[in-house]
Amino acid sequence: MTAQHGANPLRDAADRRLPRIAGPSGLVIFGVTGDLSRKKLMPAVYDLANRGLLPPGFSLIGFARRDWEDEDFAQVVHDAVKEHARTTFREEVWQQLIQGMRFVQGDFDDDAAFETLKSTIQELDKAQGTGGNFAFYLSVPPKFFPQVVQQLKKHELADAPEGSWRRAVIEKPFGHDLTSAKELNAIVHEVFAPDQVFRIDHYLGKETVQNIMALRFANQMFEPIWNRSYVDHVQITMAEDIGIGGRAGYYDGIGAARDVIQNHLLQLMALTAMEEPAGFDANALVAEKAKVLGAIRLPKDLGLGTVRGQYAAGWQGGEKAVGYLEEDGIDPRSKTDTYAAVKLEVDNRRWAGIPFYLRTGKRLGRRVTEIAVVFQRAPHSPFDQTATEELGQNALVIRVQPDEGITVRFGSKVPGTSMEVRDVSMDFAYGESFTESSPEAYERLILDVLLGDANLFPRTEEVELSWKILDPIEEYWDNHGKPAQYPSGSWGPDEADEMLARDGRSWRRP
Ligand code: BG6
């Protein structure tokens, strides 16, 4: 048989083996004094520059209320880079980057500040050769999105001058339900055309998440069993050991389901369940992901098929951790979920009747994100039952983070004179198989924005379909009591274990 390369959906990606380097451009960050900006965005810009993936005159403009000069801003970027960048600090790279760094001080309703932003962009076009190409990164609370995009329109910053581009990058959460997401979409699209808008779901920028597609569609051996005939169920876990930290203002009233199930976990589910896309371009990918999201079926009884929890005081990593209601800035009567688990199904020929259990939580046993495809048991066993009854089910586990890789669990004969079978695992670890290092998700996504590559960015349609899934769950929770308490450092409320036990299953303890 000859190998067939004709219909490989990843061929476009393979063609991109040459380094993808951004052309003349700049980035404006609104909300530049925030956590995300310091921990992720500034370090990502530096790492890209350090890897030679930014153009020589690349420019970075910070926009915030703080009374800073350009030098103060540069110092903040410097400190953030030193603390959080992935690559080694090199003075020559820094010196080049600093040439294009500017700070614009102002409120979002301050017309003069937006005029200053405009003249700063014009100045950088001349001094740094940015060619009028600028991306506006809205790293601001969602209530400011409308105001910032309106200001960009009013001051003619959203319209690209002839021969150049302007793009808007929008951080989640994109709305807090379907209605508000639609309103936001309408506001954003009044100013920016769909191909100018890049919505960030940073999970899609993770190497291991992109590898779901390589695993499934660049190989022959997984796809034939990736369906209801062989799979028993799928578990998608995103566990965090941290609490809400200093993010009370953002988190309270939002909760775990809106914060990460609506976006990261449903995206992971869509990538796991979707059909092979016709190509690796945004249109083809969105089409397949949207089909899955549109076919998701909620549990008939939301009381039995969903669980929400809230962390109580407990011990974590040998230290005493306070409960959610005792955290600074949290209303002691808050009903916000810090843990959420849902049982979903996909109504299509491949998956009908197969549960996808999604769970996420803060202050759980440890930080781990994984997708476990758990297979049905062998239809019969020729071996002595007593020797094999402890066997688990075969599973393929995509370890998204940390300890990135893939594990396959299966039964194997225990060395010896009897036919005893025991579970073993076969591991692929990125660190052992590749010398290349993985870029941070934000590095990849910022570069994609500058290149205008929209493959890894959810579209309006996906965002809205995801809210359609979540809205009835949130509404049910609003009308039914309070979240169950779970001790910090545990694996969530007992109710979540009971939910799986009713189906004769149990959660993995990663
Ligand atoms: C963000 C959520 O999207 O993802 C946070 O808002 C969460 O609550 C974070 O902590 C986790 O990201 P990562 O990449 O560390 O898994």
Image (tube, rainbow, N blue to C red):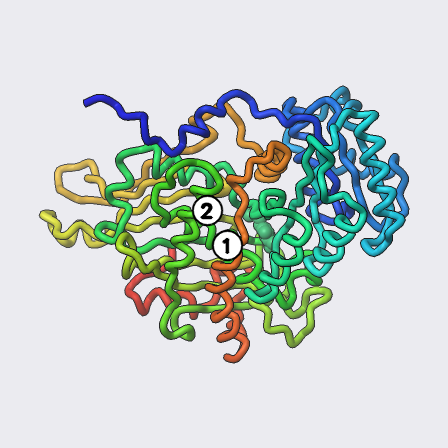
As drawn, is 424 to the left or to the right of 441? left
The quarter of the image holding the N terminus is: top left
Q: Amino acid at mark 2?
A: Val
Disc 1 is placed on an element classified as helix
Please report the residue visible at 53 percent of the width from the left and 45 percent of the height from the top: 203
Residue under the image location 23 percent in, 50 percent down: 230
Where in the figure is residue 140, as x and y percent of width and height? 72, 53
Q: Is residue 10 visible?
A: yes
- Residue pictured at 57% horizontal, 32% vertical: 439
Q: Is residue 58 left or right of residue 300?
A: right
Residue beneath label 1, please? 461
Q: Nearer the viewer, residue 252 or 345?
A: 345
The vertical placement of 335 against 184, above or below, is: below
- Please give the label number shown on residue 253: none
Counting residues from the start of the chain, the first of labels 1 and 2 encountered is 2
Residue 297 in picture, x, y percent from top left: 37, 64
Residue located farthest toward the left when viewing the structure as drawn: 382
Q: Label 1 sits on what residue type?
A: Glu
Asked whether disc 1 touches disc 2, contact meaning CB atoms under 8 Å apart, the reply is: yes
Q: Nearer the viewer, residue 41 or 469?
A: 469
Find disc 2 in the rendering and name its residue. 286
Identity of the residue drawn at 51% across and 62% down: 467
Circle 1 crowding by C-alpha within 10 Å: few under 14, some 14–19, many from 20? some
446 with respect to 291 (left or right)? right
Q: Is residue 454 left or right of residue 509?
A: right
Whether residue 83 is visible, yes or no, is no
Name above or below for residue 98 compared with residue 492: above
Along the viewing direction, whichever of 365 and 127 lies nearer the viewer:
127
Neighbours of disc 2 within 10 Å: few (<14), some (14-19), many (20+): many
